[in-house]
Image (cartoon, grey):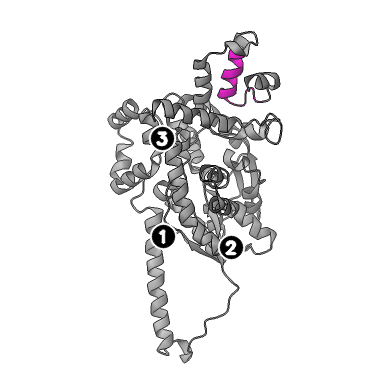
Amino acid sequence: MTEICDGCRRCHRLCPSFDHMLERVDAHDGDVGKVASADYRRVVDLCWQCKLCFNHCPYTPPHRFDIDFPRLMLRSKAARVRAEGVSRQDAWLGNVDAVGALGSAAAPLSNWANRFAPHRALMEAVVGIDRSRNLPRFHHKTFARWFRERERERKRATSSAERRIHSGATPGGARGGAPQHPPARHVAFFHTCVVNYNEPQVGRDAVAVLERNGCTVASPDQVCCGMPYLDGGDIDAAVRNARRNVDALLPLVEQGAEVVVPQPTCSYVLKKEYPMLVPGAASEKVAERTRDLFEYLAGRQREGSLATDFPGRRPGKVAYQMPCHLRAQNMGYKTRDVLQLIPGTKVTVVERCTAMDGTWGMKKEFYPISLEFARKAVREMDAAEPDTYATDCSMAALQLEQVTGVKPAHPASLLREAYGLPEEH
């Protein structure tokens, strides 16, 4: 593969992974046989799985060369883990549900600790998270807890209303016969671990937007999509998570629900990785019915069933950083298209990677490199002179906030505000 990349070079300067590989080839006057194993190991470590090279490459399937560079990097990490075991750093960063549950249970103390310099120095020494990296905030009331409490309250209210109807206590003495409405759209909401533990308001806003558009929303028990495990090469753990999530989502899919996901990495994993991690009809069905949140909303707009009355706050000029894992799904500019339905809204799309990748940009070794790429994205966003910064990816938002000090909004929050819907807590 190195010979093919050396002869093509379309991905030179795309990312440090390709740069290092091609520079080592040049150092040996084009003799790829002299590139050392240590250099290839570095190539693997520098890949943060943005997936952009796959769409950039002219030799991807169905070409006979059949090159899938991101998957090759994952396979190399997996082979390393088979031989050497999962590193302490990747074991810590990969087990998002354990860390998230602990951090949320201890919030706000955990958030204070993550700003306490001695604690950050200890984290850097033990698990290699750069002490300067801003970290996601934990919330004591997770999204899953909020959703369960909300559903229980709704059921109590529904039961109370039904008792009043059957007792003849409805206004005007009417009995039975609820108003007729169009059939509800059923959504299985895959809320994602970052929304659950760190950004529950994004999940609440997404639910509000979906319900505003006539959806009945279910949020089944679920675990992290598994991408952090894949980043560390722990395929077995990623398979376990994939199987649990497929088992949870499949019954709803078979009842006609669409799986809607508010984070691009997770929608990518459900669509692209699950059929490979847990091959079979179940994962194929779930993947086929999975939609990124704004992909789903744009589909509703195409069929003429999206609510387009916006009496609330309008975001004005929006600098929108399009996450790499949306670009890798080849779905076009769905978020831009939906946001521009809001009167007076102009969206400037910035197709610049922030080089965060959830766990990669936290590591001390790669944190400075990741910021170099984030600063390029910020410069392009600033050039738009926006009223509002936005991105679908909450980890990209964390990275952009690291550079600017301003946290970009999730587009679901902008849409909820434009609909004039109250912020739920």
Q: Amino acid at mark 2?
A: Pro
- Residue, x 55% and y 42% (percent of image)? 276
The spot of residue 287 in percent (x, y) is 57, 50
Left of 186 or right of it: where is 173?
left
Q: Give the foreground label among 1 and 3.
A: 1
Front position in the image: 331 or 254: 254
Q: Are marks 1 and 3 in contact (CB under 8 Å)?
A: no
Q: CA distance from mark 2 to mark 3?
A: 35 Å
**Residue span colored magenta:** 11-25
Q: Which mark is residue 234?
A: none
The spot of residue 240 in percent (x, y) is 43, 45
Residue position for label 2:
311
Q: CA distance from mark 1 to mark 3?
A: 28 Å
- Mark before the other along the chain sequence, 2 or 3: 3
Residue position for label 3:
134
Q: Amino acid at mark 1?
A: Phe
Q: Secondary structure at mark 2?
A: loop
Residue position for label 1:
147
289 in relation to 65, above or below: below
Q: Secondary structure at mark 3?
A: loop
Quarter of the figure that contains the C terminus = bottom left
Front position in the image: 79 or 41: 79
Q: Give the foreground label among 1 and 2.
A: 1
Residue 313 is a magenta residue: no
The spot of residue 75 in percent (x, y) is 52, 31
In this orientation, does residue 109 appear?
A: yes
Residue 415 found in image quarter: bottom right
Residue 87 found in image quarter: top left
The spot of residue 19 in percent (x, y) is 59, 20
